[in-house]
Amino acid sequence: MSNTGSKLWYFENVDLFSILCPTKTPSMSEKHPMTKYGKDEYIYFPEEPSKHVFMIASGRVKIGGQTDDGKEMLHAILGEGEVFGELALTGEDKRKDFAQAMDSNTQICPMTIEDLEELMIENKTLSLKLYKLIGLRYRKLERKLESLVFKDARSRIIEFLKDMAEERGQKVGFEMMIKNHLTHKDIASLTGTSRQTVTTILNELKEKNIINFDRRRILIRDMEQLK
């Protein structure tokens, strides 16, 4: 995936947030007021009707589902400026996953499918970017499922770091800097590993001077060595 194409995931990089958040559009602000959620509060559940697409104004949201044996499977952790619930645009009648706020005072901008489709008709660039977003996320989910089946824990964690660098990394000289809002526990959930394994692998990469990290960022010093 090219770095340019991957930027379609993030509203702050493609300037979609100002277009899509109804609070930025006076004619829609009364119709679609911003909604606040507390930590661990659900935004929607599986089997609920798919009538809205949501934009994150602040906080984080996790998207997940359940396996046949009732275990939670985490699909994504999204932050400020990102969209979710977008499968409603593809004809999804009922939600197949859940969306849950991860932070207190998480603020969400909802928009009905009808209003969003109207905007898409008026703005072809917006329409193209949203459908590319859907395609990118679908391919990413397919790759994640293949990784869970065929790759070991270390490979999954390293591939996750590579994906983060490609999707949201910023070049700093010869290095790649990723603004990070994920804990080791979050990364473990997203890669199907354990928190201890994530910590061990990250520390190993740090000792080899391939990466450096703190609570706010991950710095990949050498993408080639990481690969």
Image: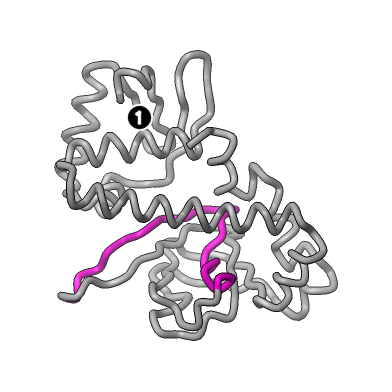
Q: How is the image coloured?
A: one colour
User: Total of numbered circles in the picture?
Assistant: 1
- Circle 1: residue type: Phe
Is residue 115 rendered to the left or right of residue 107?
right
Q: Residue at x 67, y 45 (%)?
A: 14
Q: Residue at x 71, y 71 (%)?
A: 117
Rendered residue at 33%/49% (across/down): 143
Assign the C terminus to one quadrant of the image.
top left
CA neighbours of label 1 inside 10 A, class few (<14), some (14 to 19), many (20+): some
- Classify residue 168 as left or right of residue 215: right
Q: Nearer the viewer, residue 159 or 150?
A: 150
Q: Indicate whether residue 78 is drawn in magenta.
A: yes
Q: Looking at the image, which residue is at 35% across and 66% down?
A: 64
Q: Going by the image, does 68 lie left or right of 174?
A: left
The residue segment tinted magenta is: 70-90
- Relative to 18, say whether 64 is above or below: below
The front one of 29 and 190 is 190
- The residue closer to the viewer here, 46 or 106, is 46
**Would you place residue 223 above or below residue 20 in this image?**
above
Q: Is residue 67 on the magenta stretch?
A: no
Q: Position of residue 156 (x, y in %)?
A: 24, 41
Residue 28 location in percent, x, y? 79, 74
Residue 225 lies, in percent from the top left, at 30, 18
Question: What is the secondary structure assignment of the residue under circle 1?
Answer: strand
Residue identified by numbered label 1: 213
List x then y, in percent, for residue 103.
Answer: 44, 61
